[in-house]
């Protein structure tokens, strides 16, 4: 196990009716807020009205930034910063999933920076300070509600990049599973794949002796495997929505990362796909993951895949190691297909034409991954194997 | 899953060499500190000298309160409060395990209270504020380094009681597994039993649908079962000490409790034993646990024990449920015995004479436990079954 510093300061308000805490929580940090949201589902499902009523009843002045895209754009970030600076906004409230939260985090940091916010993503500036931020989560997927990460897309440069800052960690996040009852089946499936991918990125590691982290990762994977299908088939099943909501948060709040070297190659490869083709992040991950697993499986990684197969998929441990490993990968792929997620790039309209360009871009800052380092030619092979 | 509010604000500095952060961390909160410690093992293993040198080099003024007992006394707490008040101490540094930390927490709270600190334990006062506190953990057991609990004994009233306060949560805790290399076999064993008992108290619950919490609890139990014996047989095994150290913290930092009704009957029963007989807490827990399990096993709790047996002890799930449950309890008992822990009250010098009195005291504020409510006669039966 490696050394680590643990800091998970976000306060979580979890469960039915927790939204009622919102005014009291906001007032700890500000009185003039920017409220951000996405494509409008919060208007049809009543969350928007509920929040607006709470703000009005409590005399909290608010500005709005709606229409944040699923792969949020740096142009939207710029727009948000402008609103905040012009109006002396002192708090940001994100209503939505990871896209809205990531966009809001970057706005929050941009308010303390004079240059362009894209600088945070290309290594030109580091995030030192940010406006305080709170979230009301409406989609179980990214875990952005309890960490300091933000991923933003730049359409001009066809890039989708990550930044990080301690100051980006939300002050509070409200997780009411009821707020996810109206998430469509396709989004529930993609969210489940996203959560599982976050866990895989931390689970498949070369760090030895991080036993406790690995057993916790398996616990979280089992939760996804149990409740993903239930939430898809029975969208108002509170138990399923609650477990998915909490697993999505715990999967990426650093608990699994502390003490380990992590991988993140699949995310790196997927970001190239959604930067150019604007596909759903979770779908891209579900397509790439089994092909990544197959590609990195060799003598040096075999034992980890056996552990995965036996502990997560309950595969008979008396079999040959390689049989267990291959079966584990097969089950992973079949699970994603059972959720109704496409399993090939072809199905989502991605052909061979830009794969080489994307492989080059994915590795231009160095090889992807740590479990197994992937160079340009490796990434290309994984893309090619994901076509069909 | 039940509603919950998550707040785990303690920052952890985990790993080899993390003690070097101590002066910088202390200086965030104070300049005149009370340093607390126990029976002197930190003087023989070098931790005391190391800390004192760091304090001196950094001109941090300190007062000392050594000799904190394994079941820390309210008399020691009073002594600590006196030192703090007389010298305007602004920070407390606890060097030790749960006893030292719990004593320090109560001193920290007592500095903001004009009455007697025992009031916090008998419901006469609530903890509203406390001096900031940091810890250097030298024993993996109680998890006190990342929560707001404190347990104190009162020799005059023969009581050992718990208090709680948000303000008691340490600002930081330094967890260097190397600092536990010199913990004797018996203390390592008792610590492992203590950790497992904390997990059991949260795992055996009537709350339905807290799937993610239960799978995490099993992950932590497996960690204890794997590394307890290794640490006992190979005390300087870093991997084992690291996993035990981190599991002890995660087992009682609320992560397993959030969203669940928890039990705590075994702790309630054990506190009566150590209040009167001053036995090691973890030993008392290890003796009582299998007998508590046997007593509460019935049709309504059977499924939970089956889950425990299959998921933690890898018992063949095709067997009869009752066979699995009984086997799981048997393995629990055998595991504690394999660590060298006594398995009967008789072995630790406790006879039948005070059992009735203790059962009455254990239930004088109401029945113990939630998984199954235990009244005076139930507690007595469990004590009696633990004699041999």
Image (spheres, coloured by chain):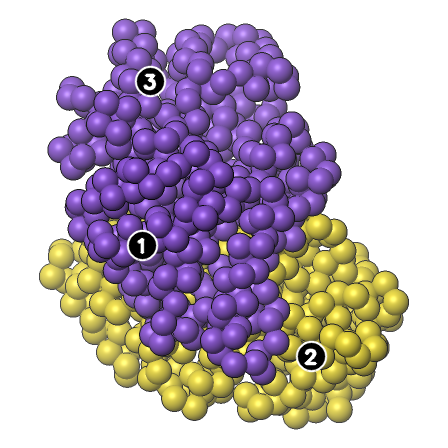
Chain colours: A yellow, B purple
Spatial CA span between label 3 and label 1: 34 Å
- Which is more foreground, mark 1 or mark 2? 1
Mark number for residue B109? none
Q: Residues within 10 Å of mark 1 (few under 14, many from 20)?
A: some
Do discs 1 and 2 belong to a common subunit? no
Q: Earlier in the sequence, mark 3 or mark 1?
A: 3
Q: Is residue B143 visible?
A: no
Q: Nearer the observer, disc 2 or disc 3? A: 3
Q: Residue at image x 13%, y 33%?
A: B124
Q: In the picture, residue B161 is in which quadrant?
A: top left
Location of residue A156 by image quarter: bottom right
Residue name at image x 50 percent, y 62 percent: B329
Position of the N terminus of chain B by quadrant? bottom left
Secondary structure under badge 1? helix
The subunit letter for the residue under badge 1 reads: B
Q: Chain of mark 3?
A: B
In three-dimensional space, the C-alpha distance between marks 1 and 2, rounded to whole angstroms, equals 42 Å
**Chain assignment, label 2:** A
Q: Relative to A31, does residue A36 appear above or below in the rendering?
A: below
Q: Gap between marks 2 and 3, in whole Å?
A: 55 Å
Dot 2 falls on a residue whose secondary structure is loop
* Disc 3: which residue: B76
Please tell me which residue lies in front, A147 or B286: B286
**Disc marking residue B381:** 1
Percent coordinates x, y for residue A286 in the rendering: 63, 79
| Residue plotted at (37% across, 86% down) | A235
């Amino acid at each position: 196990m490696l050394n680590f510093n643990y800091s998970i300061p976000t306060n979580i308000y979890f469960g039915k009716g927790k939204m009622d805490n919102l005014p009291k929580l906001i007032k700890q940090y500000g009185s003039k807020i920017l409220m951000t949201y996405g494509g409008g589902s919060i208007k049809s499902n009543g969350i928007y009205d509920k929040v607006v009523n709470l703000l009005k009843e409590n005399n909290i002045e608010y500005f709005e930034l709606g229409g944040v895209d699923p792969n949020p754009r740096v142009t939207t970030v710029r727009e948000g910063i402008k609103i905040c600076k012009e109006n002396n906004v002192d708090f940001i409230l994100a209503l939505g999933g990871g896209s809205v939260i990531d966009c809001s985090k970057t706005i929050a940091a941009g308010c303390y920076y004079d240059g362009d916010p894209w600088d945070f993503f290309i290594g030109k500036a580091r995030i030192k300070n940010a406006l305080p931020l709170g979230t009301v989560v409406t989609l179980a997927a990214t875990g952005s509600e309890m960490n300091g990460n933000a991923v933003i897309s730049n359409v001009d440069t066809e890039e989708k990049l990550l930044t990080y800052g301690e100051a980006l960690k939300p002050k509070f996040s409200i997780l009411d599973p009821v707020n996810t009852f109206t998430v469509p089946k396709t989004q529930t499936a993609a969210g489940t794949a996203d959560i599982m991918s976050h866990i895989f990125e931390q689970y498949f590691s070369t760090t030895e002796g991080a036993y406790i982290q690995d057993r916790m990762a398996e616990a979280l994977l089992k939760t996804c495997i149990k409740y993903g299908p239930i939430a898809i088939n029975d969208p108002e099943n509170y138990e399923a929505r609650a477990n998915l909501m909490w697993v999505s948060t715990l999967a990426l709040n650093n608990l699994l990362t502390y003490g380990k070297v992590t991988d993140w190659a699949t995310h790196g490869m997927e970001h190239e796909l959604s930067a150019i083709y604007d596909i759903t992040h979770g779908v891209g991950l579900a397509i790439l993951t089994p092909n990544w697993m197959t590609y990195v499986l060799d003598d040096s990684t075999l034992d980890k895949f056996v552990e995965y197969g036996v502990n997560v998929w309950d595969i008979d441990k008396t079999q040959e190691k390689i049989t267990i490993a291959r079966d584990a990968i097969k089950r992973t792929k079949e699970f994603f297909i059972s959720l109704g997620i496409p399993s090939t790039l072809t199905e989502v309209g991605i052909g061979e034409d830009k794969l080489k360009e994307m492989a080059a871009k994915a590795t231009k800052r160095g090889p992807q991954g740590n479990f197994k380092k992937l160079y340009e030619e490796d990434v290309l092979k994984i893309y090619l194997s994901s076509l069909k």
